[in-house]
Image (cartoon, helix red, strand yellow):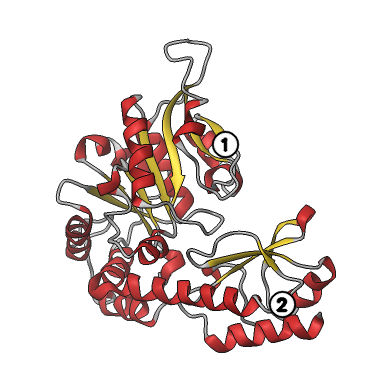
Amino acid sequence: MRGFASDNNASVHPEVLKAIAEVNNGHAVGYGGDKITENALQLFKQVFGQETETFFVYNGTGANVIAIQALAQSYNAVVCARTAHINVDECGAPEKLSGCKLLPIDTVNGKITVAQIKQYMHGFGFEHHSEPKVVSITQATELGTVYSINEIREIADYVHSMGLYLHMDGARIANAAAALGCTLAETSIKAGVDVLSFGGTKNGLMFGEAIVFANAQLANNVKYIRKQSTQLHSKMRYVSAQFIALLQNDLWLQNARHSNNMAALLANELKEVSQVNITQPVESNGVFATVPKALIDPLQNEFFFYVWDESRSEVRWMTSFDTREEDIKAFVSTINRFL
């Protein structure tokens, strides 16, 4: 059954499977000491800057947790959107493993602003207070919206002026960069982000994410934190080969453009459906909409997806690199049939 629940539900891109098969030959030094991993790390320097340092991990939660641990102490706090993955969908892992308190901000579109961050900029040097040390933003956001490069720079400039660090959860950064028409670095490290959780799984990889640090000083102890966090993969070549396939020849961009285009097509097709109301700007590969409550169960039986806000009867429809135009047409046709 095909559906619109998540880009995590999509298949693995054939080029990524091919890359895994090509390195599945003979023996290689484990834990990242192999030539394939060396080549992949050099490729990340080409993409994000020679001064950057990158570490491969299993998953996005691991990437976010390690990033926070590298930037903050257990008595610190992390400012984020209330809808942020670290706040909603990681089972308290960032708080449990880093010890840091999360300070969520209510938003209407998933994006936080400098004015909203300022409300938490107090209590510095006061031992009874969890002192903010990190601001975390998501690109693209959990609501499918995208920060402009200028919006990121504005946040980064303010965060740095306060002596804090800026973390970016980039689980869907490829979709954001494709939407903005810029490079991966331009919407992250070059815009002032100190640490980026770079997502691959939602864009065609089988498994594996990366943590990109703006400079080596920030990454001093990360190799130890990664090991303690059980995120060090032994047969690292199978992670590294996937990232080479993703970054070479702009496969990441091809995949992201396609998934974004499919979301735009879905939104356009839904304009003619009067009882479906799109609630957020469709800027990446997600469509959020309110629908009649009675529609949800029968529609989920044919195309699986998640309810985002049950109280509003708001649903989330995600597209991916392998979403087809015929999937969109069949989905909208089914909606019309049920209505």
**In front: mark 2 or mark 1?**
2
The residue lying at 57 percent from left, 42 percent from top is 87
Q: Earlier in the sequence, mark 2 or mark 1?
A: 1
Q: Position of residue 79 (x, y in %)?
A: 49, 33
Q: Residues within 10 Å of mark 2 (few under 14, many from 20)?
A: few
Q: How many marks?
A: 2
Check the image and report above or below for 249 versus 133. below
Q: Position of residue 262 (x, y in %)?
A: 51, 77
| Apparent side of residue 299 relative to residue 250 in the rendered image (left or right) | right
Disc number placed over residue 273 in the picture, else none: 2
* Mark 2 vs mark 1, CA separation in Å: 33 Å
Query: To which quarter of the image does residue 243 belong?
Result: bottom left
Asked whether the viewer can see residue 78, the reply is: no
Q: What type is the residue that disc 2 sits on? A: Val
Q: Position of residue 318 (x, y in %)?
A: 57, 69
Q: What type is the residue that disc 1 sits on? A: Ile
Query: To which quarter of the image does residue 41 belong?
Result: bottom left
Q: Which residue is mark 1?
A: 105
The residue lying at 81 percent from left, 79 percent from top is 339
